Image (tube, rainbow, N blue to C red):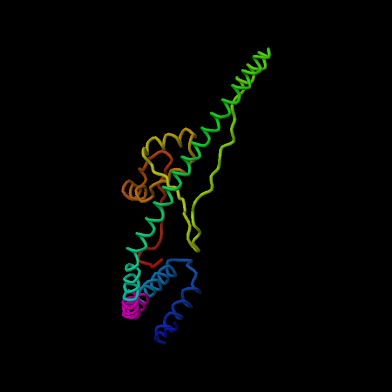
């Protein structure tokens, strides 16, 4: 979008820039000139803001109307998509629970069958006089490969079950102590800079929190940054 601005404003901006960029502050006189240029810079910002303000309001109003209408259409789809999402997810979770339960049942059956076969073999060996061999068979750890049942999940183009994880801090102080003890990484906690900066503004140089220093910054006030 090409928005034309008044030639007078463009000329004044170019004039201020030329004067400002060619000025080197070397004494009180040039310092005062720099201050005057900064003040004219502030006045020019006001003119620019006034020029664009009605244009921005019109554009923003039109943009907001479009966004509101778009969201209205999206919201019409939400009840159906929420319902279908829950139905599919609940079904999948239930099927997974049944599959895992069946895997456990099959494994337990396989272990029981293996133990019965070993016991029968040990009894036969003992009958034949091989007591040590029979004892070894009984004492040998039972290992049965875990049965893996195929997941029952019909394929639907563009859709699939997604698993996500999130961390929930249930005891902030315990986490802080763990970080201090090296049991959790430093990245697990983050300084509250909003709080610390407010304390720095209030306490200034008397801020004495361990690990924190108050830094003093200077700049010209009244200038857009």
In the image, farthest residue toward the bottom: 7
Q: Residue at x 39, y 69 (%)?
A: 35
Q: Position of residue 95 (x, y in %)?
A: 44, 48
- Left or right: residue 109 versus residue 67 is right
- Left or right: residue 99 versus residue 46 is right
Per the picture, the main secondary structure of the magenta-coloured stretch is helix
Q: Residue at x 38, y 47 (%)?
A: 192
Q: Is residue 110 above or below residue 207?
A: above
Q: Position of residue 208 (x, y in %)?
A: 38, 40
* Residue 50 part of the magenta segment: yes
Report the quarter where the N terminus lies.
bottom left
How many numbered circles does the render carry? 0
Q: Is residue 41 above or below residue 195?
A: below
Q: Residue at x 47, y 67 (%)?
A: 25
Q: Position of residue 189 (x, y in %)?
A: 43, 43
Q: Residue at x 58, y 28 (%)?
A: 114
- Nearest the eye: 100 or 122: 122
Q: Position of residue 24 (x, y in %)?
A: 50, 69
- Nearest the eye: 160 or 12: 160
Q: Which residues are magenta?
A: 44-63
Q: Is residue 60 above or below residue 197?
A: below
Report the quarter where the C terminus lies.
bottom left
* Residue 136 part of the magenta segment: no
């Amino acid at each position: 979008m090409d928005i034309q601005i008044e030639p007078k404003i463009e000329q004044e901006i170019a004039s201020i820039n030329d004067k400002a960029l060619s000025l080197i502050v070397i004494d009180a006189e040039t310092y005062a000139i720099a201050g005057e240029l900064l003040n004219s810079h502030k006045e020019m910002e006001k003119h620019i803001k006034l020029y664009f303000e009605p244009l921005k309001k019109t554009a923003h109003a039109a943009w907001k109307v479009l966004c509101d209408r778009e969201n209205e259409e999206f919201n019409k789809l939400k009840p159906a998509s929420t319902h279908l999402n829950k139905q599919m997810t609940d079904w999948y979770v239930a099927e997974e629970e049944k599959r895992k339960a069946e895997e456990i049942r099959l494994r337990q059956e396989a272990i029981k069958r293996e133990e019965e076969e070993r016991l029968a073999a040990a009894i036969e060996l003992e009958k034949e006089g091989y007591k040590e061999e029979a004892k070894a068979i009984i004492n040998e750890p039972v290992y049965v490969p875990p049965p893996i049942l195929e997941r029952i999940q019909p394929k639907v183009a563009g859709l699939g079950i997604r698993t996500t994880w999130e961390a929930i801090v249930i005891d902030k102080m315990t986490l802080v102590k763990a970080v201090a003890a090296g049991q959790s990484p430093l990245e697990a906690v983050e300084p509250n800079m909003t709080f610390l900066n407010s304390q720095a503004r209030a306490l200034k140089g008397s801020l004495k929190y361990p690990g924190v220093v108050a830094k003093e910054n200077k700049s010209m006030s009244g200038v857009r940054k």
